[in-house]
Amino acid sequence: MTPPNATGTPRIPGPAALPVVGNLFEVLGASQETSIEFAEDYHAKYGGMFALDVLGTRQIFASEHALVAEMCSSPLWSKKVHDAIDQVRDFGGDGLFTAYNEEPNWGKAHRLLMPAFGTMAMKDYFGQMLDIAEQMMVRWERFGPDVEIDVAEDMTRLTLDTIALCAFDVRFNSFYSENHHPFVGAMVGALTEAGLRSERLPGVQPFMVGTNRRYREDIATMRQITQDIVTARAGRPVDQRPDDLLERMLSAADPLTGEKLSEENVQYQLATFLIAGHETTSGLLSFATHKLLTHPDVLAKAREVVDEVLGDRTPEFADLAKLGYIGQVLRETLRLHPTAPAFALSPSEDTTLGGYDIAAGESVMVMLPTLHTDPAVWPEPTRFDPDRFSPERMDEIPEYAWMPFGHGARACIGRPFALQEATLVLAMMLQRFDIALTDPGYELKIAESLTIKPKNLTIHAANRLSHTQLRTDATAPASAPAPAPARKASAAATPPADAHGTPMLVLYGSNGGSSEGLARTIAGDGAARGWHTRVASLDEATADLPTAGPVVIVTSSYNGTPPDNAKRFVDWLTTTGPDLSGVEYLVLGCGSLDWAATYQRVPTLIDDAMTAAGATRIRERGATDARTDFFGDWERWYQPLWPELSEHYQIEDTAPTGPRYRIASTSQPAAHREEATAIVLENRELVRGDSPRSKRHLELRLPEGMTYRTGDYLSVLPQNHPELVTRMLTRLALPGDELVTIDSDAPSGRIPVGVPVRVDDLLTRHVDLTAPATQGVLASLAETTRCPPERAELEKLASPEQADTIRQRRFSLLDLLEMFASCEVDLAWVIERLPAPRARQYSISSAAETQTEVALTVSVIEGPALSGTGTYRGAASSYLQRVQPGDRLTVTLASPTEHFRPPAQNSIPAIMIAAGSGIAPFRGFINARHARATGGEPAGETVLFFGCQHPDWDDLYAEEFATYEAAGTLRVHRAYSRKPDGEVRYVQHRLWAERDSILDLIEQGAHVYVCGDVTGMGPAVEETLTRIGQDVHGPNWLTELSQTGRYATDLF
C-alpha cells in the first residue's frame, strides 16, 4: 500500500524518494532509450498514475483512460505548457503550440487561422499536396528497386515541402537535393536540445558552451528562413499574393479584437507551422509504412481498396472520401504510435484526481502510448487492427480514449490537413509501388525529440505503375452544387408572374467557417429560385424565429458545445421553454466522426429541442462527416432540398428570368423624404493616447413623440461611406447627381420605386455596399463577362468549395467589380444584387430619469479590408463616427430582455460587468441609480467591474464615475489588459480577485448584469462567476439566478 503524505491523504504511487534529490538519480540512470519506454515501464510497475520527485518538484504521469477522462471532462483542467515545450518557446515564442493559455496572441491566432484548416478549405490544398507527393513518387521511380530509401527522411522532405507550399506558397524543393533543407537540420537540432534542456540539472546549462552555441545557431537559421519567407511575400504586389495561411497572418484582423498579428508573432507562427505541420505527419507516414510491411494482411486489404478506387489514374479530391480503409490504417497507427506522444494538463484550482490531491497549477502528463493501449478500453491493446476504426465500430471507442491530436481548445487545428495529406500519400505509395523492408529482420526502434519517428527504417520500392502510365480523368465530380446561375445583365425580361417570394431564414452556427459557407450557398440558391431569404447566425435569431416559411439551420459542434455564435440560441432554446408552435424547420449538422462521442451533438440537441418546443420538422436532420465524405454528404442532402421544399409549400421551383429593376433618367426634382429622424447634438472622441480603436460618445434628440426607458436599444440605419459610393459611381461610370426613376414589377420595398432619386442617394441610403458577396452573386457575375479567363476565375470563386475563401476575405460586390473589369453590368443589375442596409442596435448609455436626449457609446470598427482592397469600415460605427451636430439619423427604439434593466427597487444591490463599449448600458444604469439615491430613495450598493486596455487610453467615463464614487453611490473595480495589476489583466480576473465581496452582495439579493462580446469576455465571465458561487450555491447557481431575473446578459 502506498504510504500517506503529510496531510493524511493517499500519496500518488511511485518510487521512494531520497531527501533533497528525490528520484533524480533514478531518472538520470534510467536504462530505457526513450522517455516513452521509461513511462511505459513505470506505468506497468505502479499503475495508471504515478509520480516522481525531482529536486523537490513532483512530476505526475497519468495513463489510464478513467483518469484522463476525469480531467478532460472537467472545466477545471486545461493545457499546460510543460517544461520541454516551454524550452521550445526559445524559437516558437507565443505561437499556437507554445503560447500560454492566457496570452492574447493565442486567441488572436486561433480565431484568425482556424478557418484555414476548416473542412471546406481542404479541397483548396489538394492540388498542391498532389504536386509534392508526385515529386516523391517520381524520385522513387528513378531510384529503382535496388536503392535503399530512408522512409523517415523522405517523408520529412515530403511533409516539409507540402506545408511550405500549401501554407506559404514557398517551394523548398527538397526532392531536388541530396541534403535536407537547412530548416530541417536546424529544427531537429533545436528540438532535440530543447528536450534535453528540460532534463538537465539546474546550473549546468551555462557551462555547455559548444551546445549553447549550436542551439543559438539553429534558432538563428530558422529565424532567417522565416524572415526570408515574410520578406519575399511583402515584396510581391498585393494582387499577386495568394490567399493562403501566410497572407491571413500578415493581413487579416482578429474578428474579436480587431488587431492584427505582430511581425514577431507572424515569425513565431511560421516556425510553429513549419515544425508542427511536417514533423508529426512525417512520423505518422513512416510508422504506417512499417505497420503495413509487418502486417501483410492489412497491406493486401489496403492495396485492394486503393486499386479499386484509383485504378491506373491520378488521384482526385473526391477519391479521398472513398479511401476509408486507408484512414483506418492511419488512425490505428496513431493509436499505437502517437507522434506527439504526450501533453500536459493542469487544474485552475486545488482538486483531486483518482482520489489523489492535485494542487492548482500542478502539471499532469498524459502519456498517449499507454492511454491508447489501456486494456480497459482496447481489447488486445497492442495488436494492430485498423478495423477498430471502421464506421461500424467507431461508436465503441469511448470519449478521450484516442487523442493523438490533443484535447479541447488547444487541440491541433491542422488535424484535417495532416490526415488528408497522409491519406493521399499512403494511397499513392500503394498504387505505384511494391514496397519491402531492406532488412526483413528489422526491429522497430524509436527516434525521439519532442516527437517520435522510426529509427533507421529503410525500404526498397519496386515500380507497379509508372507516372507515365497514369491517366487523368477529363471530368471531376462536383463536390456540391453551385447556386443556380442568375440572369445576364443585358437581358430585359420580366420576372415570372408566379414568383412566390416565400420567406426563408437560413441560420448557421460556425467556428471554422464550413457551416456558414453552406448556409450562404443555400441562401444564395434560394434567392435565385424566388425565395425571400435571409442569412444570420443562430444567436441573431435568439427568441425570434418566424412562423412564415422554413427555418433552415446549419450548425456544427465545438468539442461537444455550441459554436461561439450559437451559444445564446441554444441556451434560450433549451432553458427557457419557448413555444415554437407554427415554426417549420430543418437541420443540417456538420461534424467529424473523429470525435465520435460528441459527433452531431449540437445539431441533434437543436433538432430535438425544436420539436419538443412545438416546432414542425419538415425534413429529417442531415449530417456531414468531415472524416469520411463531407462534400458527398452535403451533395446528397442538398440536391433534393429544393424539390422537397417546393412540394411542401406547394410552389413552383423556378428562378426569375430577367432583371427585377428598370432604371431611366429623369429631369423631375428628387422626392422629399419624410422620415422620423433623430438630430445629432454632440459627437466626441472618448479615447486618448495610443488606443488602437476610436470610441465615440454621441448625444441625440429623438423624434417628437419617441421616448425611451433606461436600458433600451437605439436601432440606427447606417449610410454607406462616401468613399464606397464614389468607387461604385466610378466603376459604373455614372454621375452621382444624375436623377433617375426606378420601375419594377416585383418591388422589394427597399428601393424607391416610381419616384425621382439621385444616383448617389440611391447608393448611399438604399443598399449595403459593404455586404459580402454571396455565391449566387458570384455565379451571376460570371455570366456578365465575355473575357474567358475572368469568367473562369469567377466561376471558380462561385463554386461551393470557394465559399470559405469568399467569406473569409469578405469580398463585396464592389470589390469584385473592381477586380474583374470585363464584367458588363449596369445600375439596375447592381441594386438587385445588393442587400438593404441593416439597422444596427446600440445600447443607450443615458438614463431616462435624468435626460430626454439619448446618449450612445460606439466602438468604431476600421482596418485593412480582408479582401485586400482599401480599408474596411464598419457600416454603422463608421457612419456614427462621421456624423456632425445637426445631422439627422433614421432611428427606432427596441427593448432588451425585460430583466436587463436596473432593479425596480433602488435598494437592491446591482453588480455590473462590462468590457470596452459594453459599458454603454451600465452608464445609463449608474446615472439612474445615482439620481434615485440622491433624490432620497434607499440605495443598495452599485458595483461596476470594467475591463479596458489602459488607464490613460480608454478608461471610459472615468471622471464622471469618480464623482459618483465620491458621493458614495458607486464602486468601480477595473482591469487593464495593457497595464495588468499582477495577475489581473481582464475583467474576469478582477471578478475572481473580488469574489468574497461578490458573494456578500449576492447574499444581499444583488442583481448581476454582463455586457460584452459573446466569444471572449462573455464566456470567461460566466465561467468565473460559476466558480465563485458553486461551492456555496451549487454548480447551477447562475441558471437559477437567471430564472429568477437576477442574472441577465447582453452579449454581442
Image: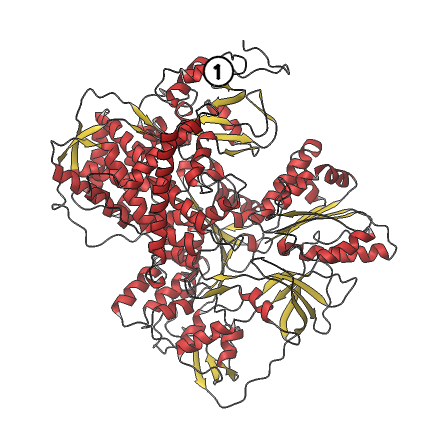
**Residue 78, horizontal then vertical, whole percent:** 52, 34
Q: 468 and 297: which one is in front? A: 468
What residue do we see at 53% from left, 30% from top? 346
The answer to whether 40 appears left or right of 979 in the picture is left
Number of residue marks: 1
Which of the two residues, 452 or 56, is positioned nearer the viewer here? 56
Binning the other alpha carbons within 10 Å of mark 1 as few (below 14), some (14 to 19) or many (20 upward) gives many
To which quarter of the image does residue 529 belong? bottom left
Q: Secondary structure at mark 1?
A: loop
- Where the C terminus falls, by quadrant? bottom right
Question: In terms of image quadrants, where is residue 788?
Answer: bottom left
Please provide percent x and percent y for residue 392. Answer: 36, 32
Q: Quick check: can you spot residue 339?
A: no
Q: Is residue 294 left or right of residue 1001?
A: left
Asked if 680 appears above or below 333 in the picture, the reply is below
**Above-or-below relation of 31 to 569:** above
Task: Measuring from the top left, give residue 1008's x and y in whole percent.
Answer: 71, 46
State which quarter of the image contains the N terminus.
top right
Amino acid type at mark 1: Asn
Q: Residue furthest top?
A: 1
Q: Which residue bears the numbered disc 1?
A: 23
